[in-house]
Image: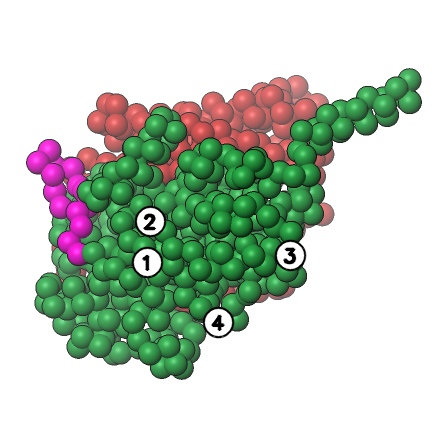
Chain colours: A green, B red
């Protein structure tokens, strides 16, 4: 009986292993599929799968297997997911992760797996590629600072804000966002007299609300999801009336669709983002149609996560095609192809990498407006093409200003 | 000075919310020695149900009542269906309640999704009140929250100190075996107290969703704050829950205003200090 069981088990294992032939190319995708980010992380997976589907799921006769794995936004969960994909599933290429600190952890991990190529999903911490970068880690997208390009200047020149207070969460991604905003805003002549760093998931912002100086012209809010709703509600309840400037994840559909009188504060608020769901560029409309056709139960338009995972996976498919699906030489040819790759992105620009293997991107300045039925939407007021990671500055000067932190940059 | 007074007021309102959440937790522990790790999930469930009811009927009070009721039913089901089997085996109960909280959290994520909910307030509570002396606006809902916590606190005190049901609970805290020997249906009393504690959590959930907001993760946040509050105040004592909530709420707000980066440290600093000096909590009785 026992032997029978063993035999059955062996058969079962064999059945699972057999279909994956040695010739297939395996792509592992890491995204957040649990907790509060689950629905957004799922959209990231859709983006990656869409790129593979678009190529027919085959490169030069070899089929592409996509294996997904969940992390939970913490760096060690991303590392565990990557290890599992590499060591148990024998993937050749990894696409992911979703969130900032996870990206830095995988960048570090990639150094211990020189035979695997890592392609970033949507994580956007600056130091993932800027400092201590890794030969086999690529990011076909921008970082949080690139995502704010255009906003600082717009706020100073078009909106006429001479000084701005900052309210942001206390971790690497908002630091990077604040840098992106301030480096433009301060050199245009604006001042940031006060910055408030709050813990992620903070519920009660009232003490921050009452500490905001009376003499600032606007507030730059780099909070995500529930945190932004809480802050804005409490600011409104306390009678606050300063205009808002939003970060890339502050002004999203969850805020625009939530109810409450605080919404009046948002009308006219500018924000920076690489993804605008109702952008009217031809490439974006085509991309949205492709997405809607493949995922009728997905969102009404691809999210920032689907957009970025799509670009990462698309880069992998294009480079694989260029090397005829060969990953023999320790993936050297594949990586060279990735490095020299140029392709048209869904936002209409040309994606290519800088010497740190970080994307040169298109960025948008958007503005919140009130539709006729009273609901809020965003519209594009400015498109900035070819934004690089040093924000158009001299790389040496940019690097010399040091890593972002609570106190860097500063212009009180 | 103005900032200090406002921050103090903020601390008091936050303390009121923490008290509402922690009093049920403390009540359940006091009688049954059950550390109910699903308390936060019940709070979040109450908040979601309250939101749906307010959206459907437009009545905020009805929303609070239904949120409390939904949590009470869920709590009674948990005690009757799962935790009741392992009465007396606290470690197993705690582990089982962690499992329940994870299952509930995922079910709620499935049904309500990952977005943030905020209960819309009745006209009388939305907007703010110009405070005398300070000359700044202060949200009505926060003032109402404090009043609500005081009312709930007094009602709880009355229930426990002045009614027959309260006398049974107090007797149960002191000597369960004797209560059982005297012929009281201890199983049903446990279910009733569990339902009462859960109802308090559910109402706190709706109020949290009105004054602040709720989303996945709120459950763990309030579970953690409830744990800290009862550790500081003393397990099983309503007065202790009030005192603990006051300390934690004020510490959190002073921290956020004057030392934003280290705000959390104050809260846990207080907890460490209490555990070192008076491990049973400020108002707790030490175990024999």
Q: Which residues are magenta?
A: A369-382
Kindly tell me whether residue B250 is visible in this rendering: no
Q: Nearer the viewer, residue A232 or A71?
A: A71
Front label number (3 vs 1): 3
Front label number (3 vs 4): 3
For label 3, the SS is loop
- Badge 3: chain ID: A
The residue beneath circle 2 is A345
Q: Are marks 4 and 2 on the same chain?
A: yes
Front label number (2 vs 1): 2
* Mark closer to the chain start, 2 or 1: 2
Q: CA–CA distance between discs 2 and 1?
A: 9 Å
The residue beneath circle 4 is A131
Q: CA–CA distance between discs 3 and 1?
A: 29 Å
Vertical relation: A99 (above or below) A180: above
Q: Position of residue B266 (x, y in %)?
A: 47, 65
Circles 2 and 1 in contact, beta carbons < 8 Å: yes
* Mark closer to the chain start, 3 or 4: 4
Q: CA–CA distance between discs 4 and 1?
A: 19 Å
Circles 4 and 1 in contact, beta carbons < 8 Å: no
Q: Nearer the viewer, residue B138 or A307?
A: A307
Q: CA–CA distance between discs 3 and 2?
A: 28 Å
Q: CA–CA distance between discs 3 and 4?
A: 24 Å
- What's the residue at 35%, 71% (across, down)? A390
Which numbered circle lies on residue A330? 3
- Left or right? Give the position of A306 relative to B137: right
* Mark closer to the chain start, 4 or 1: 4
């Amino acid at each position: 009986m026992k032997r029978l069981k063993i035999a059955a088990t062996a058969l079962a294992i064999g059945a699972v292993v057999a279909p994956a032939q040695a010739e297939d190319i395996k792509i592992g995708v890491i995204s957040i599929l649990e907790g509060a980010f689950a629905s957004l992380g799922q959209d990231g997976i859709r983006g990656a799968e869409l790129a593979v589907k678009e190529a027919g799921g085959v490169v030069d006769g070899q089929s592409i297997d996509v294996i997904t794995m969940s992390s939970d936004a913490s760096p060690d969960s991303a590392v565990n997911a990557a290890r599992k994909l590499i060591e148990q599933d024998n993937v050749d290429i990894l696409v992911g992760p979703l969130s900032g600190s996870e990206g830095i952890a995988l960048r570090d991990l990639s150094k211990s797996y020189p035979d695997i190529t890592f392609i970033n999903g949507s994580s956007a911490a600056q130091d993932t590629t800027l400092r201590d970068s890794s030969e086999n880690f690529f990011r076909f997208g921008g970082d949080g600072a690139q995502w704010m390009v255009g906003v600082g200047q717009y706020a100073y020149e078009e909106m006429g804000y001479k000084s701005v207070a900052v309210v942001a969460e206390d971790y690497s991604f908002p630091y990077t966002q604040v840098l992106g905003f301030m480096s433009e805003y301060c050199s245009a002549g604006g001042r940031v007299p006060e910055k408030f760093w709050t813990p992620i998931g903070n519920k009660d912002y009232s003490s921050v609300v009452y500490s905001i100086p009376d003499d600032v012209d606007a507030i730059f809010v780099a909070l995500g999801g529930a945190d932004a709703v809480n802050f804005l509600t409490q600011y409104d309840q306390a009678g606050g009336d300063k205009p808002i400037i939003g970060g890339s994840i502050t002004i999203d559909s969850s805020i625009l669709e939530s109810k409450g009188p605080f919404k009046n504060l948002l009308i006219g608020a500018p924000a920076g983002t690489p993804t605008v769901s109702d952008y009217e560029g031809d490439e974006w409309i085509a991309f949205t149609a492709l997405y809607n056709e493949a995922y009728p139960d997905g969102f009404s338009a691809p999210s920032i996560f689907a957009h970025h995972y799509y670009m990462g996976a698309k880069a992998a498919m294009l480079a694989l095609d260029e090397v005829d699906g060969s990953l023999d030489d320790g993936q050297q040819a594949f990586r060279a192809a990735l490095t020299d790759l140029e392709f048209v992105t869904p936002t209409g620009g040309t994606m290519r990498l800088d010497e740190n293997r970080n994307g040169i991107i298109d960025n948008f300045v958007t503005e919140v407006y009130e539709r006729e039925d009273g609901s809020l939407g965003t519209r594009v007021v400015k498109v900035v093409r070819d934004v690089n990671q040093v924000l158009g500055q001299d790389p040496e000067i940019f690097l010399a200003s040091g890593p972002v932190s609570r106190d860097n940059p500063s212009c009180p | 000075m103005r900032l200090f007074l406002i921050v103090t007021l903020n601390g008091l309102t936050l303390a009121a919310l923490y008290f509402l959440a922690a009093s049920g937790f403390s009540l359940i522990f006091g009688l049954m020695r059950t550390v109910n790790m699903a308390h936060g999930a019940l709070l979040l469930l109450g908040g979601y149900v309250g939101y749906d009811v307010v959206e459907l009927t437009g009545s905020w009070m009805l929303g609070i009542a239904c949120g409390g009721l939904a949590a009470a039913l869920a709590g009674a089901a948990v005690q009757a269906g799962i935790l009741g089997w392992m009465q007396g085996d606290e470690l197993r109960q705690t582990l089982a309640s962690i499992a329940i909280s994870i299952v509930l959290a995922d079910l709620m994520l499935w049904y309500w999704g990952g977005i943030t909910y905020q209960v819309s307030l009745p006209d009388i509570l939305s907007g703010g009140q110009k405070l005398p002396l300070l000359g700044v606006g202060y949200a009505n809902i926060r003032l109402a929250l404090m009043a609500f916590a005081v009312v709930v606190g007094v009602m709880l005190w009355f229930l426990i100190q002045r009614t027959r049901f309260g006398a049974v609970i107090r007797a149960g805290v002191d000597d369960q075996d004797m209560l059982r020997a005297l012929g009281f249906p201890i199983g049903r009393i446990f279910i009733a107290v569990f339902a009462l504690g859960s109802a308090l959590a559910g109402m706190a959930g709706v109020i949290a969703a009105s004054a602040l907001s709720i989303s996945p993760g709120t459950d763990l946040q309030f579970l953690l704050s409830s744990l800290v509050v009862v550790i500081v105040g003393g397990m099983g004592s309503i007065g202790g829950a009030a005192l603990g909530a006051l300390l934690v709420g004020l510490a959190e707000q002073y921290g956020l205003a004057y030392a934003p980066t280290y705000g959390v440290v104050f809260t846990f600093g207080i907890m460490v200090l209490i555990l070192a000096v008076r491990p049973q909590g400020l108002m707790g009785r030490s175990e024999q």
